[in-house]
Amino acid sequence: MPGPTSKREVGRGERLLPGVWRLRLPLPWPGVPHGNAWAVAAGDGIVLFDCGYHDEGSLGHLERALEMVNLKLEHVRLLVCTHAHSDHYGQAATVVDATGCELWMHPDHEHMTRSATDPEEGLRRRLEVARQSGVPAAPLERFAEQRKGANTGIARLVAPDRDLVPGLEVDTDLGRWSVHETPGHAPSHVCLFQPERRLLISGDHLLGRVSLYYDYGYSPDPAGEFLSSLDTVEALDARLCLPGHGRTFTDVQAHIEANRATVAERVQRCLCVVSEHGPITVFDAIPHVYGEPVTALNANWWISETLCYLSHLERQGRVVRIPGDAGPTGPGAERWASA
Ligand SMILES: [Zn+2]
Ligand SMILES: [Zn+2]
């Protein structure tokens, strides 16, 4: 039992600017202890940008964070989600049910909808990607066992009332926010920009520290899409970034460049590993790319990321994918080689 001195995470709210509040909400994930929702004053209420992960007690964290800045859930007039991941969209149904507000989100949310509609199918799909990447059977079975019936972080699927696409604007007391599609991290990802104040609500597209994650399997080239999205955001010339995790930052351009450099370095490393060790499976390539072996904690993240770089290189004609040989339980793991 956590004692009185326990440092258990709770929701916290703080004012960033007049009419803008950061709501820091706890997450159950190792290495990602919390995520941000942003409240922005709008008439007699607020627009809520993102809403946190759904879990036992998670609504209490959101309410506590709001209360710390003298706000209440009833003040939410509109919910806008930067993308459909559970840590940004998870409580959408709860917020919509409690307030009757509209939800605005990008229509390409299938990357979440599919696994949330049918968690078993979602798990089966993830296991298939892992198996095809060369993850051995024993750890895969352990993973499948742990995930069965586990919380998806999504209270209930709720469809957006309006498609959050360029042209739509979000009205607040600080002015209007324009919508910019920034796929890569997730197909449904958008950033919101307030041009007079040059504020950017960046979701997970741009974070205080470089942390690359891509949803693999829902679009042709997530890494390439991410790089184009960095160009999109660069053109906005934002002064202050309000990210989906961690603190705000001002040196937006330097963050964009750091992301580009990290992607370029990892793509290059994948290319080198394939040319030195290929034909090689993703599972066997990962220790060479990251300098560390695959563990249960990093497996999903690194497999997706490496697959995205290899698919990016495949599109450029620099590597080739070799399908696995047919075996008694289906095709074996695919391997990657220099073109
Ligand atoms: Zn995300
Ligand atoms: Zn996130």
Image (cartoon, rainbow, N blue to C red):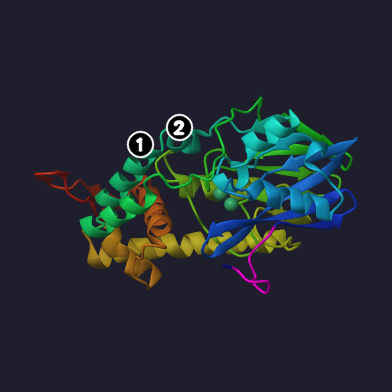
Q: Is residue 93 above or below residue 288?
A: above
Residue at disc 1, secondary structure: helix
Nearer-the-camera pick, 61 or 306: 61
Q: Amino acid at mark 2?
A: Thr
Q: What residue sits right under mark 2 in the picture?
A: 117
Nearer-the-camera pick, 100 or 233: 100
Residue 237 seen in the figure: no
> How far from the left and from the top, in percent, is residue 115?
43, 37
> How far from the left and from the top, in percent, is residue 117?
45, 32
For marks 2 and 1, give the CA distance.
9 Å
* Label 2–label 1 contact, CB within 8 A: yes
Q: Is residue 260 magenta?
A: no
The residue located at (41%, 38%) in the rendering is: 119
Q: In the image, is 262 to the left or to the right of 73?
A: left
Start and end of the magenta stretch? 2-10
Q: Amino acid at mark 1?
A: Glu
Query: Where does the N terminus fall, quadrant-wise?
Result: bottom right
Q: Is residue 138 above or below residue 222?
A: below
Q: What residue sits right under mark 1 in the picture?
A: 121
Nearer-the-camera pick, 89 or 28: 28
The secondary structure that most of the magenta stretch takes on is loop
Q: In the image, is 261 to the left or to the right of 270?
A: right
The residue located at (60%, 68%) in the rendering is: 2
> How far from the left and from the top, in percent, is residue 305?
42, 55
Q: Is residue 85 above or below residue 140?
A: above
Q: In the image, is 112 to the left or to the right of 145?
A: right
